[in-house]
Amino acid sequence: MLSQIAAAAGTAEAYAFVAKFNEIILYPTIALLSAVAFLVFLWGTAQYFMNAASDTARQEGVKHITYGIIGLVVMLSAFTILKIAAATFGLDQQASCAQNPNQNGCEDAFKLPDINSNNPGSGSPGSNNPGSGSPGFNNP
């Protein structure tokens, strides 16, 4: 019983950590890097049009446009892979609630099921319940 409580507490702590990690680090990092990639794309576009007379400056603009598009594709891919992984492991509601915890349906998104409700053999060591505790600790 004590190990089940410790496991439930550890699982709850892991869920809380993942939710905070997504909210504080992962999603803002993806948004920031996407914004940087978009700015690089815009800078390359501006370089390309402002320096239309110079072939070397236009080539530099094309490089920035290319790097910006590659950056946007990478960030979109990272976000998509994260969403697919969350949906695969059944965490899509948790991922959605980590982004916006105030939306409908997020009240129970990070609550763990009661582990003792469907386990009739659970009990504390020393009880007369045959499914309880460790062997050798039950009092007959």
Image: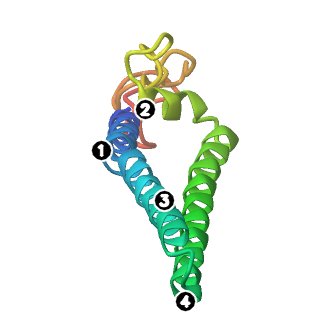
Label 4 neighbour load within 10 Å: few <14, some 14-19, many 20+? few
Label 2–label 3 contact, CB within 8 A: no
Specify the amino acid type for callout 3.
Answer: Leu
Q: Find the distance from the CA under tag 3 to the CA under tag 1.
A: 27 Å
Residue 99 circle label: 2
Judge left or right: residue 54 versus residue 27: right
Q: Find the distance from the CA under tag 4 to the CA under tag 2.
A: 44 Å
What residue is at 67 percent from the left and 45 percent from the top?
Answer: 84
Residue 42 circle label: 3
Residue identified by numbered label 4: 56
Which of the two marks, 1 or 4, is nearer to us in this view? 4
Label 3–label 1 contact, CB within 8 A: no
Residue identified by numbered label 1: 24
Label 2 neighbour load within 10 Å: few <14, some 14-19, many 20+? some
Label 2–label 1 contact, CB within 8 A: no
Specify the amino acid type for callout 4.
Answer: Thr
Label 1–label 4 contact, CB within 8 A: no
| Residue 22, visible in the rendered structure | yes
